[in-house]
Amino acid sequence: MKTLIGLTVANLKSLVRDRAALFWTLFFPVMFVLLFGVLFSGSSDSKVDVGWVDQDGTTASASLRATFADVQLLKLHDGTLDEEKAAMQRGDVSAIVVVPAGLQTATASAANGKKASVSLALYTDPGQSSTDQVVEGAVTQIANGFNLAVLAPNSAPVLLVEGQSLTSTNISTVTYLVPSILAMALMQLGVFAAVPLVQQREKGILKRLGATPLARWKLVASNILLRLLVAAADAVLIVGIGMLAFNVQIVGNPVEIVLFVFLGAAAFLSLGFMLASFIKTEEQASGVVQVVQMPLMFLSGIFFPFDFMPEFLRNFARLLPLTYLGDGLRQTMVNGTQIAPLGVDAAILVGWLVVCLAIAARSFRWE
Amino acid sequence: MTHSGEPVIRVADLKKHYGDIKAVDGVSFEVARGEVFGMLGPNGAGKTTTIEVLEGLREPDSGVVEVFGLDVCKHPDSIKQRIGVQLQSVALYPRLTVAELVDLFGSFFDHRVPAKQLIDAVDLGERANVRSMNLSGGQQQRLSIALALVNDPDLIFLDEPTTGLDPQARRSLWDLVKGIQAKGKSVLLTTHYMEEAAELCDRVAIMDHGHVLEMGTVQELIGRRFKERAVFFDTSAQLPSQKLAGLAGVTRASQEDGQTLLYSKDVPSTIGALLAMADDLSIEPKNLGIRQATLEDVFLDLTGRALRD
Ligand SMILES: Nc1ncnc2c1ncn2[C@@H]1O[C@H](COP(=O)(O)OP(=O)(O)O)[C@@H](O)[C@H]1O
Ligand SMILES: [Mg+2]
């Protein structure tokens, strides 16, 4: 155990002191999140965007809108119901409030002691539970306040809230990108693991270690341990930045997310081990690693929504493991639309893991 | 120096072939406890292959290979606890410091020497916190030796420890090896520098093309082939070697690198005759001197080739 930790610490120090390696494994993905976050988050303030559909068009509805606009947390976007639904599906607004025709009339009747009521329709996405709570809370409070203002005590409320759910088929770009960037980072940390391994072999370090009583499995285990640690660091950094800076909501079972992160890291690490088995020199290593990671990065369904890709690219992407890691992470983290069921994603990653590891075990050279 | 007891290394008829290349082709030798044993030979002679079989890094094709009386193929782990290894190429994590490397390698062994003591012993005390990639070649070699000593081994393998070093760094490494021997440890080293073998080794095996050609102390190896010593001086046109070959005591005359060499069984008579001849011509031989045959001459005589290149 002491040797395993010692070796892992040695590898970690080597990684941290290697600027190029550090760039690819940590800074590059973080840069991606920041860059895409700033580009796509539109408003970087933490207000909740709400679509406002006024079908009444009277002074009553205008004063109701003013009350909503006063709420610090909300930012209203006016439009027709169809426009706002489209905006919500794009991820531009998180909820829609619809003021039905007849608000003014019903209010007037109620003031005269007649029984009358109208229902505000509130569209929210159940997948985005924490935004929902903010909006629902605000809408309910305002409706209550409105009722108290216009009615005599103990009469039936005139303004009701009727919840509607609208699943936004496309979640917001940043929300889509955070799991994608995490998938990319996990892919890179695995594939790039080939570089120090080849270096250590070419420098004779692996051979030198072979002349000590150090067991080989510990050497392999320390490499895996190190990369899983980096995977955890990548996940915390990327998700953390997404949540804190760009208001990305992580829903879903944390255990599932963690399992997917580690499964993905392990699958790509075994791909890295396999690459290290075939690469001959240190110079080759950095080239080969780029040649492998670039197509994975751009041709898997991680950066361009899968449905937007042309048919032939989509078929190609279906062959790449990163497509399934991205899909799995999106499904577990932000409830994204699926390319394949979660079980299939996991099974394909396990398949890659097993095949690459078997090939690496057969053909890895220690010197 | 006397060596007693069971040998620390026993190799008998070791063979290791790579396809058609007979890297090691029937090598036998023993190293006694406390002995510094040298394998001297040109590149490709099979030195590294032999030493790496002993270190448990390569499988022999056939032959007996024992370290501490144990078969290296059957007991690699217990042997590795007790040996120290320096590979031919410096194999260090480039971004770890001297102290970190000593700690890391120490952690692989059951028994270890205190790190500070070891770092001071190889004179790297002031460089303890420098990354290995920023050390000079000589410092890297000394660090490699420190790592080979981290488990206080009984037997140390050094594969070309001074290749590529400047003379001063080479000297400091030689002192280090002498210190190791003074502690009663056994050393197997390879080199293609005959001065190094002569300076450090109790016994030497001369290797070429996977074979041991000759084995013994340096004096034995020279004495076996060269009964004569050589009188040398700067070659002069007035003293051609044909004329000199007839001088008293001379068995053979040759010229190399602007020097004339007269091999002689009776050096005083040869010098007397040479000076008389020069006097007749009213000249004086320049840079006159006497030298004994060296391992280099032994190798030349054995193979017809110079040791280096
Ligand atoms: N792994 C190997 N595969 C093929 N040939 C090898 C290998 N290792 C050594 N050789 C060959 O075996 C011969 C002896 O090499 P080596 O033991 O390194 O010699 P030395 O250390 O004396 O220079 C050389 O011809 C070398 O090319
Ligand atoms: Mg060699």
Image: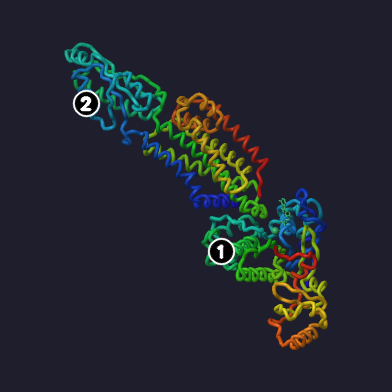
* Percent coordinates x, y for residue A272 in the rendering: 58, 41
Locate residue B77 relative to residue B243 in the image: left or right. Answer: left
Q: What is the crowding at mark 2: few (fewer than 14 residues within 10 Å), some, or many (at least 20)?
A: few
The image quadrant that residue A271 belongs to is top right
The residue tagged 1 is B136
* Percent coordinates x, y for residue A47 in the rendering: 31, 33
Locate ligand 1 by image quadrant: bottom right
Q: Of circles 1 and 2, which is in front?
A: 1
Residue A185, above or below B196? above
* Residue A93 circle label: none
Q: Chain of mark 1?
A: B
In the image shown, does A152 or A101 lie closer to the viewer? A101
Q: Under tag 1, what secondary structure?
A: loop
* Same chain assignment for discs 1 and 2: no
The residue tagged 2 is A66
**Residue with the most extreme left position:** A112
**Residue with the most extreme top position:** A114
The image quadrant that residue B289 belongs to is bottom right
Q: Amino acid at mark 2?
A: Ala
